[in-house]
Image (cartoon, rainbow, N blue to C red):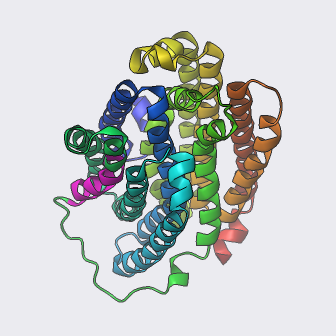
Amino acid sequence: MKLLDRLPEGTVAVGGGLMVNGLAAYAFITLASRALGPEDYTPVGLLWALSFLLGPGFFQPLEQEVARIIAARSGGSIGPVVRTAGCIGAGMVGLLVILALVLGGRIRHDLFDGHGLLVVGLLLVLVGLGIGHLVRGVLAGLGRFGGYSRYFIGDGVGRLVMVLVLVTTVGGVGAYGLAVGIAPFIGVVFALVGQREFSLEGPAEPAGGLSRALGALLVASVATALVLNVSPLVVEALAGSDQADDPGRFLNALLIARVPLFFFQAVQASLLPRLSALVGAGQFDELVNVFRRLLGLVAGIGGVAIVVCALFGTWIVEFAFGADFAVERQDMVLLAASSAVMMMALSFAQALVACRAQGRMALAWVFGLVAFPPVVALGDDLFLRVELGLLATVSVAAASMAILFSARLRSTDRWNSTE
């Protein structure tokens, strides 16, 4: 019970949905890996990585701001916020879809090995994730974490069911790409089932009123998505002609190492509304207490994950995906370490957003990304240089955020009275 007390309200509910989503996701990845083999699986894996780079990268700010504002209103009308956020989200989706269509030929041939249905899957997932993040922001802000949890259940189970259907009808690599694209829509349907007393009446709020810091949040979110998803894309870009299997191998090892980070989404979903409510009430001592307890728990989970990956990581990868996807123990330890530090960075990021320091949070992510290229440029071992670059990036970002958060708390009287 003491362990659960460290978690924000709603974490357990969202965690249950993420557990189902995670099991379904790993079943999907295992099925794709074994059915397609390392070479044909690589473009599907890159679609997976690219969708999470573009989707959450651009739409996470909308979810965060909608959740923060609705939570801070404590029962006020949500209609103006949702209507304005929907207009902004639709504009962002439109721009991304147009960009994907303009670059469709290059994306198809350079990333997806000529598979046109993977481009269709990418377009679908952009639209689906745009809608999904808006719905999740509203549900998190209202504290309806049961509906938030059902989004992940629908997304994960829907993806697995769709691929089983599509493999028998469409077949080949395209079936997996379409399943990735359709899944978020199923998640939205699951999330909204049974939602009552959900009125959107009222005029739209001016776009500038949604958040003056949306631009900073967008920079931070894109930077976060780059940190989370750029490494397999970099492996693809740097791999030689004799390393065609390496991007798929690296991605699957990364997915195993990031199991704790995947479930950390449950903490993220409930942490921001909780901290935002405390900031809105001026309860900064309680804010620090809640955050310290959570940070200790996150550090412990990260440490356990590193040990588990050191002892069993390579075996888990081979057991799940087959001997063709084998990696070294060193790879699993470094990837697990970067995931552990990433959870710390994300915790500080949520705290900075709650304290209305989105610009500082964005700056910290930029600092982290600056560390990536010079580290990757060193050495000849493809996996090692990317893994060290990833670890350096998250470490710099986490340390920067810790410093900025402490400085923000020391000036609470000044900024809380003026913002």
Q: Nearer the viewer, residue 278 or 88?
A: 88
**Image height of 191 relative to 255, above or below:** below
* Residue 118 percent across, percent down from the top left: 41, 50
The magenta stretch is 179-192
**Per the image, is 188 magenta?**
yes
Q: Nearer the viewer, residue 27 or 46?
A: 46
At a point 82% along the width and 27% down the height, the residue shown is 379
Q: Is residue 361 left or right of residue 148?
A: right
At a point 36% along the width and 32% down the height, the residue shown is 32
For the stretch drawn in magenta, the main secondary structure is helix
* Residue 56 percent across, percent down from the top left: 49, 55
**Image height of 419 relative to 121, above or below:** below
Q: Is residue 378 left or right of residue 77?
A: right
| Residue 167, quarter of picture | top left
At a point 55% along the width and 10% down the height, the residue shown is 311
Q: Is residue 162 visible?
A: yes
**Image height of 200 relative to 261, above or below:** below
Q: Is residue 151 left or right of residue 401?
A: left
Q: Is residue 285 visible?
A: no
Numbered marks: total: 0
| Residue 37, quarter of picture | top left
**Image height of 386 relative to 165, above or below:** above
* Residue 350 percent across, percent down from the top left: 57, 53
Quadrant for the C terminus in the image: bottom right
Quadrant for the N terminus in the image: top left
* Residue 410 percent across, percent down from the top left: 74, 57
Q: Nearer the viewer, residue 177 or 336?
A: 177
**Per the image, is 152 magenta?**
no
